Amino acid sequence: MTNASPTLPLFSDGMNLTEQELIACQTLSHVVVDRKTRSKASMAGHRASLVKGRGMEFAEVRHYQNGDDVRSIDWRVMARTGVAHTKLFVEERERPIFLLVDLSHSLYFGSKLMLQAVQAAHVAATMAWSAVQHGDKLGALIASETTHLELKPRSRRQGMLQLSSGLVDVHQNQLNQFDNLPQDPEHIYKACQRLQRIAKPGSLVWIITDGHHFTPQCLAPLTQLKRHCDIGAFVITDPLRQGTINLPKQFAFPVRDGKQQLTLTRDSYQKWLSEQLASQQEFVQLMNQLSVQPKFIDAGQPLSDQLELLR
């Protein structure tokens, strides 16, 4: 890690969450690659397609078959080969983008720059702005111990507005509920079950989490989801939980981890760190079973310094 102190993103204080800072994430979204879905089709006929598209792009030619529209015949190829050929085109379709944003209380932890929950919201907003710019529909499921907020896919800025509002509301509710945290060890499992039901086939699903509440049970609904959707994952980390922060030889400082109040010393820190890394590795192994390679985002640095991970 560098010695330079990182700077908080625009409009952010690292703890609270505002719609202003989520709007500011729009400036980061240009690095996200547009993952389009395309379907091959012959030239359109007399009726308009029911599938919204971004246009028709030439793909290839094949031998003419009975029933092909004569307007799709490639006369140049026919003149050259003496055999009728049909032009095929690629239709660019809107692709639903779905975000599963984990705002469990384990993400309300920050040792250097911001809470992991705030960084999770920044990642979600950046991916959402990318969807808006590429003309895709945007939906989300924001999950916490107290809330499962389901946002149906909506077009363009409508989808972004409902996401930013939902993130701010759930985040504030989590901060307010810190001393009255209910215990529901299956809240992320239930979110995975719900996600498997509501994500439409062909969707691109991004999971944004610290990984701590994903249990082996989650594999079944996520496997079903993977059969008809693409999945990607971001793991939100913290320098203290990764062992990448410089600590003095002797220390004793209080840490709140979920409902646990701890005092970490040089001796107890190593055991605590091992538990944190083991929990994170369990999530990585779960994703690997789905052939998904998670990307790690550090809450100790602004997202603008980690843009290569969004490509």
Image: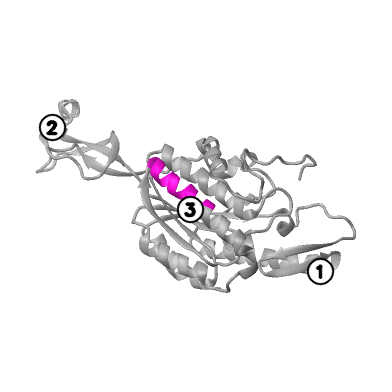
215 within the magenta span = no
Residue 244 is situated, as x and y percent measured from the top left of the image, at 75, 53
Residue 129 is situated, as x and y percent measured from the top left of the image, at 47, 41
Residue corresponding to mark 2? 71
Residue corresponding to mark 1? 268
Which residue occupies 58% across, 72% down? 182
Asked if labels 2 and 3 touch by Cβ distance under 8 angstroms, the answer is: no
SS class, disc 2: helix
Identify whether 246 is placed above or below 282.
Answer: above
In terms of image quadrants, where is residue 237?
bottom right
Residue corresponding to mark 3? 166
In terms of image quadrants, where is residue 72?
top left
Report the residue that reaches farthest toward the right: 250
Asked if labels 1 and 2 touch by Cβ distance under 8 angstroms, the answer is: no
Residue extent of the magenta highlight: 156-168
SS class, disc 3: helix
In terms of image quadrants, where is residue 253?
bottom right
Asked if labels 1 and 3 touch by Cβ distance under 8 angstroms, the answer is: no
Label 3 vs label 2, nearer the camera: 3
On the picture, is 128 further left or further right than 24? left
Residue 205 is situated, as x and y percent measured from the top left of the image, at 44, 54
Identify whether 269 is placed above or below 4.
Answer: below
- Report the Cα–Cα distance between label 3 and label 2: 49 Å
